[in-house]
């Protein structure tokens, strides 16, 4: 548990951090440090330079607008989990943040760090995908927006360039929209507390019928994916238990992740069971 | 004046320094000129070492020296203290060496060490050491290692069998099984566990050449034994040339009883490099290099009459000991396991055969409960299997077979307890209390109702008895009547009442969180009538404490506490005689009570212990022949062990669709004899239950076929979290042990011993509609779900 030699640089601004990344090939960004530092202690990660963005104040905070919520990259899970404003505007995110790891990790870990790390078993990627969020990154050439569906590329791999800093995440304030409800359910690994499977479900109802259906499954595949067949099966239906169960049965994602605790077959099964349960909750919250 | 401290939930004397961070653990100790060691460990589970090149590492900046096993050839392999199988287990054979020389038998075995100015430099240099390994075939399974096609691990142990140990009456048991109405057979796997102490191990050693003296700081549950083993059995020097200090110890659960190679290595290094050397174990090292627990594969055959009366129990167990033997590894699945297979029941015929085996895995030795959790798991699962087979209520089967209050002292059948007898008990009373707390009959109705709605509730019992207070020395030791443990097991306590009436108590037991500084002081306070704040307990240092065997096997109160009690009696007696002299009264007319000695019937006119301490210390006027000072020591060898018991009940719900088990309620009625400090007792029970539940549901050390520990970190190995658990509902009964004057039994391990089968029994009860009789632990969601699915085919 002793890391290899590493230099440390405290970035003064996002541009300064991007510059440091560009100039140092072995550099890594340090935010909350709750993925990177353990990896360094095991010498799995051996960056030559840590570029610490943890002291750039404007990178943290939650700005709630009428239609959108903008969350700074350094906002900790603990901050998200207790934000009353966010609970009103985007409750599913608050629900998920409270399920991440434990209190100590939530106090240090950041939303941007989690997303940039793209661990297949982490919670936020599933939520960000379900919410169709927009991620903002800043590099030497300036700022750009990345859609959530184009952000995750593979296991621990994102669309971020080596010298880009993820600065904020924008999600819809669906809590303000009538007839919308969402739920996040997680099967927690008893050791790591990561999601063995996480399901984010969102339903939009009009006149008692489903007009919007989102089901995203994390933990079963390298990156979270939409359960399209389930989403399609729900459209235009009444959100009754029978209809939801029938739709969940159409779950056809092919689970590729598996380990000694939960095989891929079991993960696929969990995805189905949890989808049904998450949809029931979402429907209830949407006012069904 | 403080009296009645015994039995009071006093706050712990040690907590202020623990809570504020003032306490000093091993890694907090820094000596002038100290250097740091890092150990290179084998990535192979079984390999020959063809050569080690340390050249590059030696040249690394900050590195002082690099050593391999060749440099410590003169030191023998470590001792193994279990000598029961004559000729089969030899001391210093098939045990770890300080560093392995030509062969490794498990991953994590130390093969080289770097000493450097700081730990980072030492770790950097580890990567530059080149070891030429020749990998050998690997076997990890406790039973399969005995098969003909298994690779041979030690030349002197054919079929990898370390010992083949039997107790009880084989013929009688077979005959009884043959004439039973039903015989139930079942294989039960008690999986390997990683003990997960909060403070991992560590050691600092210093050597002073002029006096040829070592001082060794280590994370230890038994510093006196460590000194004895290191000096007499490894270094071959007088005990007087070594001092062992255990600073604050952050949990042990058994793992810190043993002599490990690293401790001897640090002492040897301190001499070689001429500077104090520190090694602090990382968590990764802890997982591979510190002892594990359990790992049994057991086949049971139990016979019963139709009414549920158990007629015979036959047990065959393969006990995995690892690649090399830990200090007392073979003693756990024998003395502390096989001998407790009668449980709380009058089973008339018992036979047990344990095959201890070598595999290419880490060392296995005592882990909280040490043998008794494995025995209790076998017995309590067996009773439930009988109930299931006969379609009887598991409560009734227990009642039918219980040893009754009038049966004590009770010798279990076929002399399986080797001459000892259960001391006292009222098993049904504890059971009734637990059933009342859970409201058993109404639960059964609720369960039936829930099943109709597709909800699967289950209830499980564990009506355990265990053995504590180890042990009468002649019973445990190496002798004609002994169990073959190369030790005695008495304890010591020295009470010194200083001139001001303040007490310094030194003891030979060594806590790792148990609260001895409070409970031992409570005994002194009660007996001598001295306020708690006037008593200090000193321990953990071979300099200044009387010899003791240490803290494990729930023995400190029942054995060490009695040494304290007896010393207090000796102090009282002397105080009484001194008071008689000072008051010019006849000693036989004097009594001692509530902190003073007085003429019987006249408590107002007497001498307080403070006055007497002063008079004894100043020695201006003492009775003829009396030595100055109130100071006495006791070495107490218990006449019997103690046998705590109780009833644990677990209520679960199994999620039919995911297989997830949720514990809805957990109740425990424990009878630990007299409680010295009920708050500390509750704390022990809480922690113990949690560890036992964790074995049932979450924990499991897994080696793959190459001998790699795949559950090698807390990312994979599920240490229980508070959020997984309900609030425990505790009750108790009090049956005093007649074997000691305080009536204490022991509580350090009861929770772990009792809880595991209660949980598994509850889950099997929940799964009974699916006709699932048994699943092996841990009962992970996927395992349960698959079992249910298999019944739907």
Image (cartoon, coloured by chain):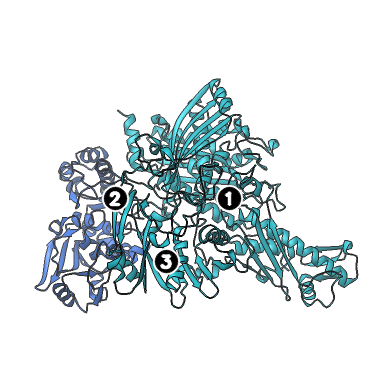
Chain colours: A blue, B cyan
Q: How far apart are labels 1 and 3 at the CA level?
A: 28 Å
Q: Mark 1 — on which chain does it sit? A: B
Circle 1 or circle 3, nearest the eye: 1
Looking at this view, name the residue that lies furthest to the left: A141
Q: Which chain contains the residue that carries disc 3?
A: B
Compared with residue B719, is residue B419 higher up or lower down, i.e. above or below? above
Q: Which residue is mark 3?
A: B279
The residue closer to the viewer here, A257 or B559, is B559
Query: Label 2 belongs to which residue?
Result: B134
Tell me if B113 is positioned left or right of B60 in this view. Answer: right
Q: CA distance from mark 3 to mark 2?
A: 28 Å
Numbered disc 3: secondary structure: strand
Q: Which residue is mark 1?
A: B486
Residue B620: percent from left, percent from top: 83, 78
Q: Are marks 2 and 1 on the same chain?
A: yes
**Residue B616, horizontal then vertical, whole percent:** 79, 73
Residue at 59 percent of width and 31 percent of height: B347
Q: Where residue B108 sits: x, y (%)? A: 37, 55
* Left or right of residue B410, residue A57 in this image: left
Name the one closer to the observer, A43 or B107: B107
Res. B337 image quadrant: top right
Instruction: Give the number of marks.
Output: 3
* Residue drawn at x 57%, y 23% as measured from the top left: B176
């Amino acid at each position: 548990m002793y890391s290899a030699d590493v230099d440390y640089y405290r970035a003064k601004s996002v541009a300064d951090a991007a510059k440091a990344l560009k100039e140092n090939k072995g550099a890594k960004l340090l935010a909350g440090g709750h993925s990177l530092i353990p990896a360094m202690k095991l010498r799995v990660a051996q960056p030559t330079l840590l570029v610490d963005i943890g002291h750039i104040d404007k990178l943290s905070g939650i700005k709630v607008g009428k239609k959108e919520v903008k969350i700074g990259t350094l906002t900790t899970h603990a901050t998200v989990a207790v934000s009353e404003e966010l609970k009103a505007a985007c409750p599913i995110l608050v629900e998920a943040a409270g399920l991440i790891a434990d209190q100590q990790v939530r106090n240090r870990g950041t939303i941007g760090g989690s997303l940039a790390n793209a661990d297949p078993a982490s919670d936020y990627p599933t939520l960000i995908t379900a919410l169709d969020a927009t991620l903002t990154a800043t590099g030497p050439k300036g700022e750009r927006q990345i859609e959530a569906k184009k952000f995750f590329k593979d296991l621990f791999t994102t669309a971020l360039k080596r010298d880009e800093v993820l600065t904020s995440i924008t999600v819809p304030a669906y809590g303000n929209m009538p007839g919308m409800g969402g739920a996040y359910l997680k099967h927690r690994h008893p050791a790591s507390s990561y999601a063995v499977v996480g399901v984010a479900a969102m339903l939009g109802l009009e006149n008692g019928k489903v007009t919007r259906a989102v089901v995203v499954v994390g933990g079963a595949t390298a990156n979270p994916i939409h359960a399209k067949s389930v989403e399609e099966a729900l459209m235009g239906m009444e959100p009754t238990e029978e209809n939801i169960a029938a739709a969940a049965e159409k779950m056809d994602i092919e689970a590729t992740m598996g380990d000694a605790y939960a095989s891929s077959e079991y993960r696929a099964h969990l995805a189905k069971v949890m989808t049904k349960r998450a949809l029931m909750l979402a429907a209830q919250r949407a006012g069904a | 004046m403080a009296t009645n401290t015994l039995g009071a939930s006093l706050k712990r004397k040690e907590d202020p320094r623990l809570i504020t961070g003032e306490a000093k653990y091993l890694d907090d100790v820094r000596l002038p000129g100290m250097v740091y060691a890092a150990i290179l460990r084998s990535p192979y589970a079984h390999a020959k070492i063809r050569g080690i090149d340390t050249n590059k590492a030696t040249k690394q900046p900050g590195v002082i020296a690099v050593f391999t096993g060749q440099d410590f050839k003169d030191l023998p392999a470590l001792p193994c203290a279990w000598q029961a199988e004559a000729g089969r287990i030899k001391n210093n054979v098939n045990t770890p060496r300080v560093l392995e020389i030509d062969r490794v038998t498990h991953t994590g075995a130390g093969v080289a060490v770097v000493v450097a100015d700081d730990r980072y430099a030492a770790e950097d240099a580890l990567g530059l050491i080149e070891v030429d390994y020749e990998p050998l075939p690997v076997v990890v399974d406790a039973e399969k290692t005995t098969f003909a096609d298994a690779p041979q691990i030690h030349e002197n142990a054919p079929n990898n069998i370390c010992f083949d140990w039997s107790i009880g009456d084989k013929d009688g048991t077979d005959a009884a099984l043959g004439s039973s109405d039903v015989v139930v057979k079942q294989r039960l796997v008690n999986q390997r566990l990683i003990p997960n102490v909060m403070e991992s191990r560590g050691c600092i050693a210093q050597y002073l050449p002029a006096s040829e003296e070592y001082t060794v700081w280590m994370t230890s549950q038994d510093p006196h034994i460590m000194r004895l083993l290191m000096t007499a059995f490894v270094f071959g020097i007088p005990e007087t040339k070594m001092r062992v200090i255990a600073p604050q110890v952050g949990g042990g659960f058994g793992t810190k009883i043993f002599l490990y190679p690293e401790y001897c290595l640090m002492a040897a290094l301190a001499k070689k490099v001429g500077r104090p050397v520190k090694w602090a174990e990382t968590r990764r090292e802890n997982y591979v290099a510190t002892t594990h627990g359990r790992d049994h594969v057991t086949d049971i055959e139990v016979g019963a009459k139709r009414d549920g009366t158990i007629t015979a129990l036959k047990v065959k167990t393969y006990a995995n000991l690892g690649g090399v033997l830990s200090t007392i590894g073979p003693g756990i699945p024998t003395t502390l396991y096989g001998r407790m297979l009668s449980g709380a029941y009058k089973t008339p015929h018992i036979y047990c055969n344990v095959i201890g085996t070598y595999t290419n895995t880490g060392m296995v030795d005592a882990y909280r409960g040490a043998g008794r959790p494995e025995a209790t798991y076998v017995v309590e699962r067996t009773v439930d299997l009988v109930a299931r087979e006969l379609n009887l209520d598991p409560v009734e089967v227990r009642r039918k077979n219980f040893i009754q209050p009038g049966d004590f002292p009770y010798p279990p059948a076929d002399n399986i307890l080797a001459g000892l007898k259960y001391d006292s008990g009222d098993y049904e009373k504890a059971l009734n209390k637990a059933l009342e707390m859970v409201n058993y009959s109404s639960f059964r109705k609720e369960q039936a109702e829930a099943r109709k709605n597709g909800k699967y509730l289950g209830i499980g019992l564990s009506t355990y008895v265990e053995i504590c207070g180890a042990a009468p020395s002649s019973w445990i030791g190496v002798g004609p009547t002994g169990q073959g443990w190369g030790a005695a097991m008495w304890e010591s306590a020295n009470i010194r009442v200083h001139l001001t009436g303040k007490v310094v108590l030194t003891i030979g037991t060594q806590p790792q969180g148990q609260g001895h500084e409070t409970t031992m002081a409570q005994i002194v306070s009660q007996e001598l009538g001295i306020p708690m704040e006037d008593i200090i307990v000193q321990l953990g240092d071979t300099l200044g404490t009387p010899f003791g065997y240490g803290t494990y096997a729930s023995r400190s109160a029942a054995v060490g506490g009695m040494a304290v009690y007896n010393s207090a009696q000796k102090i009282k007696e002397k105080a009484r005689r001194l008071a008689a002299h000072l008051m010019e009264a006849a000693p036989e007319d004097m009594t001692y009570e509530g902190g003073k000695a007085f003429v019987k019937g006249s408590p107002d006119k007497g001498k307080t212990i403070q006055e007497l301490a002063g008079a004894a210390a100043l020695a201006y006027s003492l009775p003829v022949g009396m030595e100055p000072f109130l100071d006495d020591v006791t070495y107490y060898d218990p006449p019997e062990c103690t046998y705590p018991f109780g009833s644990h009940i677990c209520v679960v719900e199994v999620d039919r669709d995911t297989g997830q088990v949720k514990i809805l309620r957990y109740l425990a009625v424990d009878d630990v004899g007299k409680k010295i400090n009920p708050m500390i007792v509750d704390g022990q029970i809480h922690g113990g239950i949690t560890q036992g539940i964790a074995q049932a549901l979450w924990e499991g050390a897994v080696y793959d076929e190459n001998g790699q520990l795949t559950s090698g970190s807390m990312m994979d190995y599920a240490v229980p979290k508070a959020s997984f658990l309900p609030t425990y509902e505790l009750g108790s009964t009090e049956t005093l042990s007649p074997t000691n004057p305080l009536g204490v039994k022991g509580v350090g391990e009861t929770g772990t011993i009792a809880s595991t089968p209660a949980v598994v029994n509850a889950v099997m009860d929940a799964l009974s509609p699916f006709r699932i009789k048994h699943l092996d632990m841990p009962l992970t969601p996927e395992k349960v779900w698959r079992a249910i699915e298999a019944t739907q085919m």
